[in-house]
Image (cartoon, rainbow, N blue to C red):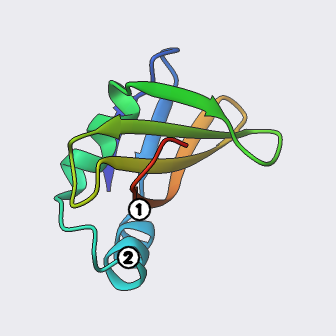
Amino acid sequence: MWETTDPDGRKVELPIDNWLHILEIHTELRVEAEAIVDVVRDPEHAIGGRTAGERWYYRGGAGPSWWIKVVVHYEHGHGRIVTAFPRRAFP
């Protein structure tokens, strides 16, 4: 498991199962797990997700496409990275 804090100081984890999901489903995203948690720690952009407690973090130039999008679900003040994938455009 990898851990970081988001820009608001909340703890965010990347569990091994979620990392394996990213590797299996988003094979085009050829970065290390540390690059994923770094997007959350220091994003270029952060916006609300589709549901309450979800946040999307973006950083440009860190992957095979221009942007990496990292989806975090928050519950009880802690976050969990659920997926990450490349994006050609923001958002």
Quadrant position of the C terminus in the picture: top right
What's under tag 1, amino acid-wise?
Answer: Phe
Q: At x 28% / y 57%, what residue is drawn?
A: 65
Observer-nearest residue: 83 or 59? 59
Q: Position of residue 82 (x, y in %)?
A: 54, 59
Whether label 2 touches label 1, CB < 8 Å: yes
Q: Compared with residue 45, is residue 83 higher up or lower down, i.e. above or below?
A: below
Quadrant position of the N terminus in the picture: bottom left
In which quarter of the view is residue 30 placed? bottom left
In which quarter of the view is residue 54 placed? top right
Q: Secondary structure at mark 1?
A: strand
Q: Work out how far the residue at label 2 is from the one at label 1, CA to CA, in angstroms.
A: 6 Å
Q: Which residue is mark 1?
A: 85
Check disc 2: other Cα within 10 Å, few if <14, some if 14-19, many if 20+: some
> Residue lying farthest bottom?
24
Q: Position of residue 11 (x, y in %)?
A: 47, 30
Q: At x 39% / y 71%, what residue is drawn?
A: 22
Q: How many marks on residues?
A: 2
Q: At x 38% / y 25%, what residue is drawn?
A: 44
Q: Which residue is mark 2?
A: 26
What's under tag 2, amino acid-wise?
Answer: His
Q: Position of residue 80 (x, y in %)?
A: 54, 49
